[in-house]
Amino acid sequence: MNATLTEKAGARIVVPVALEGRAYDIHIGRHQLCEAAALIAAFAPGAKAALVTDTSVAALHGAAFETCLHQEGITATRITIPPGEGSKSYAQFIALCDALLAAKIERNDLVIAFGGGVVGDLTGFAAAVLRRGVRFVQVPTTLLAQVDSSVGGKTGINSPHGKNLIGAFHQPALVIADTALLDTLSEREFKAGYAEVVKYGLIDDPDFFDWCEANWSRVIAGGPERDHAVAVSCRAKAAIVARDEREEGDRALLNLGHTFAHALERLTNYDSSRLVHGEAVAIGLALAFRFSQRLGLCTGQDAGRVARHLDHVGLPSRLQQVPGGAGTADEIVSAMTQDKKVKRGVLTFILTRGIGKSFIAPGVAADEVRGFIEAELAA
């Protein structure tokens, strides 16, 4: 990736997701709510719509978006859920499905997910199973959702056994990422989303990681660097999804750091006051590099560089930074055994030979992981 900006400041960026029979576009830019409404109206003329959001997003942006939709002739039934990871539950899933049926949403109608990753994951799963599948649009309002969860068709809810264990692949018909909406995020939420941005550099794009090191503060501040970071991330994910829609191959690389992260989220009971997803991912990224170093795959220089960057941004990089504690090594390894990449009870990790050199490592011994975590907890 060229370290200079490749997007024209202020211009809308369109990133295609090339899936045969299910292709769609990601539209990226500032102040796009009314453009989003126009795109939705053109895509589904005359269709009924349901607008699913959470109470926080509704208070900030709900009226403005509904006005834009109304101007395009779309009257959407608003369905509001509580904010936070706790809404990715069986109870909220049932309630949302019932609300969509009460709104008489039919197969040719449209469900609009207007919120962060929780809203998108929950709404997408409901859309996947409602009447055996209805169309849905993603209008993500957090950095994490714009660069990751809104793209690729992974939908689902959590179980007491682990994160995202109940779900379906159901591609959106359209994704509209209005980067101006990110201006209302808290500093903590924005930085948490940034962990998913820097992940793309660590997977296979060392030039992008270099760019992130130089430009992360401007990404947070807004402007063309923010749009560029979102666009690069979306292009990277779109390319992987086009090759491997259902995670049967290299799409698993997108889970760099996530085996550790999902275990930490489960052990903190998905309590966002203690740990949000992006913070767990940041710790997971640092752990993945240090674990790779311990196995002799990656240099300490690269592992240290990753941790230093996360520290500079203000993200956690160690287990000791989990408020209330991360649990014991046995508890963390036990939580990992419900990871979706486990095959026949054997752990699979995404490890790395250096920045931009990640790979899928099946059959990692649990004792090796346990020893590493014990050393991390004692550090």
Image: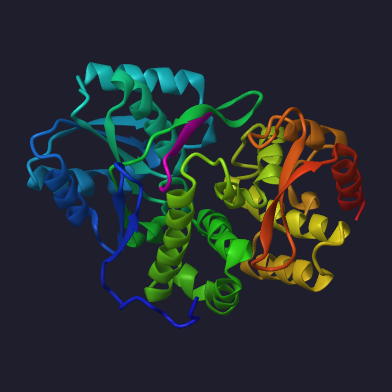
Residue 225: x and y, percent? 43, 74
Q: Is residue 208 above or below residue 37?
A: below
Q: Is residue 120 left or right of residue 104?
A: right
Q: Is residue 179 left or right of residue 259?
A: left
Give the camera-side residue of 256 and 330.
Answer: 256
Which residue lies at the image location 52% right of the left edge and 53% below the top edge? Answer: 189
The stretch drawn in magenta includes residue 104 = no
| Residue farthest along the bottom direction in this orientation | 4
Q: Is residue 136 above or below residue 345?
A: below
Hey, which quadrant is residue 32 in on the image? bottom left
Which residue lies at the image location 41% right of the left edge and 29% below the top edge? Answer: 125
Residue 83: x and y, percent? 45, 36
User: Which image quadrant: the C terminus?
Assistant: bottom right
Whether residue 242 is visible here, answered yes or no, is yes
Which residue lies at the image location 46% right of the left edge and 49% below the top edge? Answer: 241
Whether residue 325 is visible here, answered yes or no, is no
Give the camera-side residue of 128 and 126.
Answer: 128
Residue 162: x and y, percent? 64, 29
Which residue lies at the image location 85% right of the left edge and 44% below the top edge? Answer: 369
Q: Is residue 55 left or right of residue 158?
A: left
The stretch drawn in magenta includes residue 154 = yes
Total residue callouts: 0
Colour scheme in use: rainbow
Q: Which residues are magenta?
A: 151-157
Residue 335: x and y, percent? 74, 32
